[in-house]
Each structure stands twice: as C-alpha cells, then as structure tokens.
Amino acid sequence: MVGGFLGADPVLALQYANRSCYDMPSAHIIGLGDGIVPAPLSHALAAVFKHPLILQHDGGHVIAATPEARSGFGKFLEDMLRRKASGVDFRQSSIKMTR
C-alpha cells in the first residue's frame, strides 16, 4: 500500500476490528514528508496487519524509487512467489524491514 490509511467510516470500523482479516503479509510504502496522508496515519494502518513490511522514504505522497525501497519491495514479492510455489502459508512474510 502506498499512502494508505484507516478510513473514518463507522462501517469500516467493524472491518478493522476483525483482526483475522489482516492475518496476511502486507507492504506499506510511507513517505515521511507526505502532506496528503501523514506518516502516522499510514503507520496506524500498517499496525492493523499482523506482519507488515514498512518501507519509509523521505519523500512525499509518491512511490519511492530509492534503492532501499526497490530492494525491500522486491524481496517481499520474491518471498510471496517462493511461498506460493512451495505451498507454504503465505500469511507470515519472512521479510522484516523498516527504516
């Protein structure tokens, strides 16, 4: 997710409360200088997931093109492909990275 956040809609709050829906790997690209979706809101969304991969960058509301972000997201995708091919449970990513 890029610039993701939890919505304020009360109907969505019921979904957020159902933690089993978020028992899956997730990747969150967060711009520390994001003026549209402030980083703390994106971190709150990431915290809902059981095993979030958080890739931060100093930019704004953009998909980071830094070597660290490309590498981290690439490893995440490779891990998901490897798990799918081997039949391993996809719900826990082995990639742990924050900046």
Image (tube, rainbow, N blue to C red):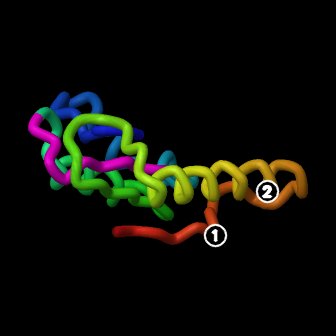
* Range covered by the magenta-colored residues: 27-35
Q: Residues within 10 Å of mark 2 (few under 14, many from 20)?
A: some
16 left or right, relative to 95: left
Res 4 → quadrant: top left
Instruction: Say which residue label 1 marks.
Output: 94
- Tell whether position 31 is magenta: yes
Q: Amino acid at mark 1?
A: Ser
Element under disc 1? loop
| Residue 29 image position (x, y, % from top left) | 37, 48
Element under disc 2? helix
| Residue 8 image position (x, y, % from top left) | 16, 33
Specify which label sits upstream in the sequence, 2 or 1: 2
10 left or right, relative to 53: left
| Residue 89 image position (x, y, % from top left) | 75, 59
Instruction: Say which residue label 2 marks.
Output: 83
Mark-to-mark CA distance, 2 and 1: 10 Å
